[in-house]
Amino acid sequence: MAAPELYPTVQDEVARLTSSPEVRAAFDRFRSQETQFAQWQLEATQVPAPPFGESARGAWLADRFRELGLDPVEIDEVGNVFGVRAGVGRRFVALSAHIDTVFPASTPLNIRRQGSRLYGPGVADNGAGIAAMLAVASVLTSARVSHGMPFLFIGNVGEEGEGDLRGMRHVFATPRWRDAIAYSVIVDGAGADTIVAEALGSRRFEIIVRGPGGHSWSDFGAPSPILALSRAIELFSHTPVPASPKTTFNVGVIRGGTSVNSIPESASMRVDLRSTSMAEIDRLERAMRDSLDRAIAAENYTAAQHGVRKPQRVQSEVVEIGNRPAGELARESRLFKVIHAVDSQLGNAAQVQRASTDANIPLSLGREAIAIGGGGAGGGAHTLQEWFDCNGRELGLRRILLTMLTLSGAGE
Ligand SMILES: [Zn+2]
């Protein structure tokens, strides 16, 4: 008979860690330090961090990393912030949170607190992730929690929208980090009830239609980029999509024209295609291009009927502005087992989900990665009405800490 006690299960490791005095002390601090965590969250959210404009928030985060004793603290050439907590060996357990928001620099950030609730754009996505990362780093020091492998804390840029995961892409394109990060735990938003272990693929486009333009009265009949684009949207909006594999499309931005009495010279739109199946994304892309071609032909045909000559035509250009690779965490991987054991230890019911997060990058490279929430509750993501409720943050923080400690080998 084999001696199973020689090979402790992951569940045993988690149980042993949970009952250790230092982890219990860390858990206590997760409760007693909540005021500090909420304060960090408010402060971080108050520093604007639009796509491609995250440097002020990055500098703020680097200061916090230094205060918490992480060493070294570095900012790379794209703006990712790194802080190391030393351990045994050269491979890291990484804990990351994206620091960018979807909001342009001009957005009024009316960040405020009412009771247990924090309000303001970006307060949960990803103020909750930044606060969770700082909370974990702070209790590791204050409760003197020992761990095995070293920890790498990352505040990365470029997760949202047009950022197209550029921060995480850069981390995993840098040999020093790519080869050293064994596990990636990504904290994105609020909650503790999900495990993103499957990376949702997406493709995004900017479509520009250009034409001759003209005066609304004297050039009437010239083909119009706005009308062509409108036709394309109308046609494309009827594209059937399957419920399974779930597949979606969105026209998120339209622009065009200069004045009410001018036939526009250009119009553009931004389109987001998503699916759990790359084949469905390919099919949607073909439908989108086909709708556009038909709309351009129809607009030019109408102009020709008005007697407008051939050079006076609308033309389109399709530019890919985003491409997020799909991937999946193997069920037999250590990270998958650890997060399940941690949830079982904490009595937490969490669902495995597929989404588009920073985890797409390591997962698409075959590396172990998950994205989870920073605890508490949140809503209104990507709107000015965004909120975060601090109640229940503790559970999310315990979950993150136990996962990292177990991954590091501290419970073996
Ligand atoms: Zn986010």
Image: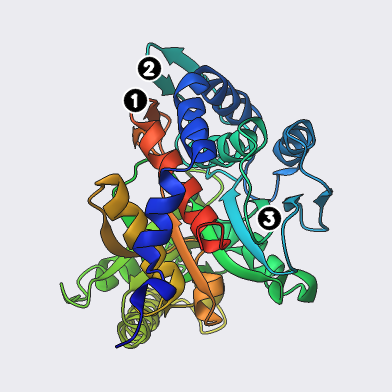
CA–CA distance in space, label 2 to label 3: 30 Å
Q: Which amino acid does the dot numbered 3 rest on?
A: Leu
Residue indicated by mark 2: 116
Q: Which amino acid does the dot numbered 2 rest on?
A: Ser
In the rendered image, residue 240, in percent from the top left (x then y), is placed at 18, 76
Q: Quadrant location of residue 389?
A: top left
Residue indicated by mark 3: 152
- 369 left or right of 383 in image: right
- 51 left or right of 286 in image: right
In the rendered image, residue 210, in percent from the top left (x then y), is placed at 55, 69
Label 2 SS: loop
Residue indicated by mark 1: 391
Q: Are marks 1 and 2 in contact (CB under 8 Å)?
A: yes
The mark that comes first in sequence, 2 or 3, is 2
Give the residue displayed 52% in from the left and 45% down from the top. Answer: 102
CA–CA distance in space, label 1 to label 2: 7 Å
In the rendered image, residue 56, in percent from the top left (x then y), is placed at 75, 36
Above or below, 16 relative to 212: above
Q: Which amino acid does the dot numbered 1 rest on?
A: Asn
Q: Are marks 2 and 3 in contact (CB under 8 Å)?
A: no
The mark that comes first in sequence, 1 or 3, is 3
Whether residue 89 is visible here, answered yes or no, is: yes
CA–CA distance in space, label 1 to label 3: 27 Å
The quarter of the picture where the N terminus appears is bottom left
